[in-house]
Image (cartoon, helix red, strand yellow):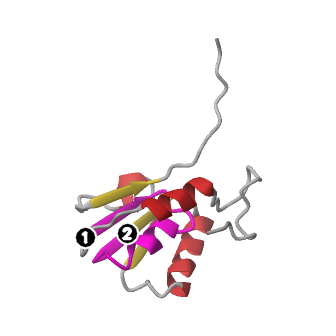
């Protein structure tokens, strides 16, 4: 699986990031059949989309508006919009007290200077 050219992985200001970590996680998922899945920091929606064939329901949560729109579009393009719902919000805020069997999270990497 390679990174599509329209997902910049070298620019820090990219609205939607898809790097090797996203692809590695997508290839490593083991979703139990008929489970309810929560994908936090959904970004492009790749984890949610890969989870959809085995899951009963998938909710992807994304804070960035453009990324949430792209994830929604990607679910339509991958024909899984009947099982995947993308919501805009901040982490668990978008799901309230809903319960999930599997929680996936691939948070953005934010470089931090270390002192010492």
Q: How many marks?
A: 2
Is residue 25 toward the left or the right of residue 110 in the image? left
SS at badge 1: loop
Viewer-nearest residue: 5 or 87: 5
Q: Is residue 88 visible?
A: no
Q: Which residue is at a point 34% across and 57% down the rendered structure image? A: 103
Above or below — where is 99 with respect to 13?
below
Q: Which residue is at a point 73% across and 61% down the rendered structure image? A: 8
Q: Which residue is at a point 44% across and 69% down the rendered structure image? A: 48
SS at badge 2: strand
In reply to whether residue 113 is colored magenta, the answer given is no
In reply to whether residue 55 is colored magenta, the answer given is yes
Give me the disc on residue 59: 2
Give x and y (percent) for residue 109: 59, 44
Quarter in which the C terminus is drawn: top right
Say which residue label 1 marks.
35
Give me the disc on residue 77: none
Neighbourhood count class around disc 1 (C-alpha, 10 Å): few under 14, some 14–19, many 20 upward: some
Neighbourhood count class around disc 2 (C-alpha, 10 Å): few under 14, some 14–19, many 20 upward: many
Separation of disc 1 and disc 2 at Cα? 11 Å
Give x and y (percent) for residue 1: 61, 69
Looking at the rendered image, the disc whose residue lies closer to the viewer, 1 or 2, is 1
Q: Is residue 27 visible?
A: yes
From which residue to which does the magenta span run? 35-58
Is residue 89 toward the left or the right of residue 21 in the image? left
Viewer-nearest residue: 46 or 71: 46
Give x and y (percent) for residue 100: 25, 62
Viewer-nearest residue: 98 or 114: 114
- Going from the N terminus, do you reach mark 1 or mark 2 first? 1
Residue farthest to the top? Answer: 116
Give x and y (percent) for residue 105: 43, 53
């Amino acid at each position: 699986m390679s990174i599509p050219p329209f997902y910049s992985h070298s620019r820090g200001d990219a609205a939607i990031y898809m790097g090797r970590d996203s692809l590695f996680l997508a290839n490593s998922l083991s979703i139990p059949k008929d489970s309810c899945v929560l994908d936090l920091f959904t970004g492009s929606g790749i984890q949610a989309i890969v989870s959809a064939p085995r899951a009963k329901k998938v909710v992807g949560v994304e804070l960035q508006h453009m990324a949430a729109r792209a994830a929604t579009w990607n679910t339509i393009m991958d024909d899984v919009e009947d099982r995947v719902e993308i919501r805009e919000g901040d982490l668990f805020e978008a799901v309230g007290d809903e319960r999930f069997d599997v929680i996936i999270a691939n948070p953005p990497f934010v470089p931090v200077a270390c002192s010492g």
